Amino acid sequence: MSKDILLAFDIGNTNIVVGVFRERKLLTNWRLATDKSKSADEYGMLLTQLFSYEGMDKNDVADIIISTVVPSLTYTMQHLSSKYFGVKALVVAAGIKTGLIVKYDNPKALGSDRIVNAVAAHETYGGDLIIIDYGTATTIDAVSGRGEFLGGSIIPGIKVSSDALFEKTAKLPKVELEAPGQVICRNTIEGIQSGVVYGNMGVTEFIVGRMKKEIAAMTQSEEPVKVIATGGLSTLMASETHCIDIVDKLLTLNGLEIIYEKNKAARVPRPQDRGAESYGE
């Protein structure tokens, strides 16, 4: 038996994405529904079945890293890690080594998913960057070529906007999120699709354009800013959004693997590390 697998959990408000790494290479990934009512045993049995389906041995898991924006699931996944894999999971939180300089008023309030994306983009693409994550909430963040997390914007997610329209109105239907091909629409379904999809594209274009100017003022750099998009709807949004340079659906999982590599040599906390209050270098 060779214990050489890293299991990475990216826990979002809608989905949990699980990545299986061996020797720094992503072997496979699974997408599960985020369910705060599920127990560690329920998730554990589901993962056991997925390992079996892929012909892999869960006993080969050497370590686990977790990023979550759902605090109530932190203990659940830690308990799962201990009971089903015999591992005390590394949780991305304040005090963990990231390689970034975080210029945020309160680093503790910064979502771990945003940090993980920033680490992955900085390490993979370099230079001044804008990272867009189309999730339950859409986040648009700025990272300098020097590895400074400069801050960003948070927008209601595309699906959240569409669902709110359906839930808060009496006659408007729930629709599939796809681009209808025009903004002058002759039926209600396409009208909603146009407003939600193209409206969010317009928001993306505006914020990215303004953010590029602010990055240039902050960094005094004349180098072009690369725009990286990730998340479930990133391909749809990039299809007619001219400001997106790269779509990287695996950005967050790869960021978790990178952060793990930065911290694996110090998995047992040293006395001088206790009480760290921010995401550090």
Image (cartoon, rainbow, N blue to C red):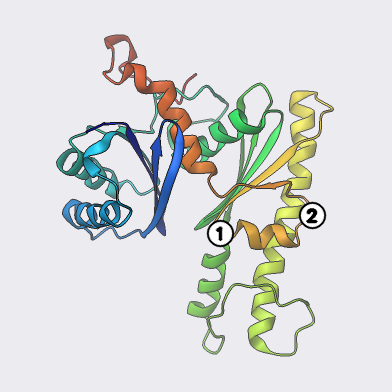
Q: Residue at x 28, y 57 (%)?
A: 36
Q: Which mark is residue 28?
A: none
In the picture, residue 89 is in which quadrant? top left
| Relative image position of residue 37 (x, y in whole percent) | 23, 60
Find numbered disc 2 in the image and state the secondary structure of the residue it sits on: loop
Q: Is residue 241 left or right of residue 86?
A: right
Q: Position of residue 271 (x, y in %)?
A: 27, 10
Helix, strand or loop status at disc 1: strand
Q: Which residue is mark 1?
A: 156
Foreground label between 1 and 2: 2
Which numbered disc, 1 or 2, marks the residue that appears first in the sequence? 1
Q: Is residue 152 above or below residue 188?
A: above
| Position in image of residue 95 (x %, y %) | 39, 23
Estimate how packed mark 1 is, as few (under 14), some (14 to 19) or many (20 or more) residues with alpha carbons within 10 Å.
some
Residue on which the image places disc 2? 242
Outermost top residue: 272
Frontmost residue, 141 versus 262? 262
